[in-house]
Amino acid sequence: MPDSKYDIVVIGAGPGGYPAAIRCAQKGAKVALVEKENVGGTCLNWGCIPTKALLASTELVAKAREAEEFGVKITGVEPDWSAIQARKQKVTDTLVGGILQLLKANGIDLVKGAASINADKNVSVETADGAVTLETDKIIIATGSDPAELPTFDFSQPAVMTSTDALTLDHVPESLIIVGSGVIGSEFACIFSTLGTSIVMLELMDRMLPTEDSRVAKQMRSTFRKQGIDIRTETTVEEVLEYRDDGIKVKLSSGDELEAEKLLVSIGRKFNSAGLGLEELGVEMDDRGRIMVNERMETNVPDVYAIGDVVGGILLAHTATFEGLVAAENATRGDAAIDYSVVPACIFTTPEIGSVGLNSDKAAEQGIEVNVSRFSFGALGKALAMGEDYGFVQLVIDAKTDKVLGAQVMGPHASDLVHEVAVAIKMGATAEDIASTIHAHPSLPEAIMEAAEASHGKAIHVAPPKKR
């Protein structure tokens, strides 16, 4: 049984909660961490890590099929879904085990069960052995989010899936309708398309990846179409015509009818704030259940903090981690504030997408005059040698100061490359600063240097405009 009195209780052991607990312990606090499911939260168990493990397998399948282009003959490439799933689980289990060791090493009590906060700001936990009460001075809420569901669909039907369900399929479906073409839907499209699933993606907005830069979205749609993925924008499911054990039939807003073995709903997340007793405590929330906080991650109730998806904003694991560290500093008599100005975001499609800072549309909304400079991976030696010469680097540069304000990268290792620009933005660097920094050759980061050079008309590997 856990002790009864703690300096800090953290509710939720996801990518925000467990780092917050560790940082509090590092600063000398006695900490309890409450988790009703698995440590690591959605990211480690049902999101970031398992999907990347699946993508690593399917990307290897795709590469093996292209081996002859590299002078290597491989015959009989055959994905083994059960083995792919087993590897995914092994990766997750290894990381969960690592977190458990870290919690133990830092002297943190892990309490398994569902938590609620009572009127005197102590935490009650329904454990397998009965209810326990954790007395505490301060609370950090890190309860995260779950996949949002649409009332159009009956999620008890075997053909209808959330992203969590899709990760535990016992076979590869022959056909799949994906409702929503955002990050989650696009990553699953890449996974199952490579494994032979026939896919139709439906998007309510006028383009796929509607939150991304318009040029990136346009090129990704072209890439998906070449992969045989049918993308239908400004389209949604109007009605489910039939549920079957082996499939589903729907009517679209366009009037078309579609049938598939499975339907995946990937239209966003819902905030996990219900059942915590926040209304009785007087914690301010919006009408969707998002907990309102300030830049110190404080709620309106003294000594109660909230972090991660449950506070809305940028729903990314690494954002939750930094919010957790800010909350931990302030809960242990420190002074920290969150800074959202430079937050890289990555989409692990094929090719990858990495973005940070402003794109040209957002700059225009803020009234900032910008220069947009690009360099294609098709002109880069390392990308050609790798056989991954599709995509581009795009820098968004303040026209008056030459400071780099943002970047969009679509191509090989985009999720890695974007961090050079993230540091540049954080440090207030200019395009000239990047252009005048020697980059190794041959390497992928040269594309960032070339884009920076192109903004000043100095790029060696970009043909000058034709003279009229």
Image: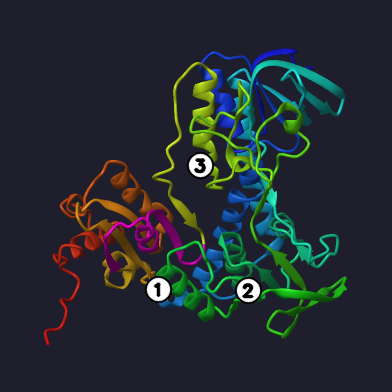
Quarter of the picture holding the C terminus: bottom left
* Mark closest to the chain's N terminus, 1 or 2: 1
Quarter of the picture holding the N terminus: top right
**Left or right, residue 385 beside residue 245:** left
Are there few (<14), some (14-19), or many (20+) residues within 10 Å of tag 1? Answer: few
- Report the disc number at residue 103: none
- Report the disc number at residue 319: 3
Q: How many marks?
A: 3
Secondary structure state at the residue bearing disc 3: helix
**Left or right, residue 190 beside residue 406:** right
**Res. 422 visible in picture:** yes
- Location of mark 2 (residue): 201
Please give the name of the residue rendered at 87% of the width and 24% of the height, measured from the top-left corner.
129
* Mark closest to the chain's N terminus, 3 or 2: 2
Q: Amino acid at mark 1?
A: Phe
- Coordinates of residue 18 in the picture (x, y in percent): 60, 31
Q: CA separation, marks 1 and 2?
A: 32 Å
Are there few (<14), some (14-19), or many (20+) residues within 10 Å of tag 3? Answer: many
Residue 353: say if magenta: yes
Secondary structure state at the residue bearing disc 1: helix
Please give the name of the residue rendered at 51% of the width and 22% of the height, measured from the top-left corner.
330
Range covered by the magenta-colored residues: 349-375
* Mark closest to the chain's N terminus, 1 or 3: 1
Q: CA separation, marks 3 and 2?
A: 28 Å
Q: Amino acid at mark 2?
A: Met
- Location of mark 1 (residue): 70
Q: Amino acid at mark 3?
A: Thr
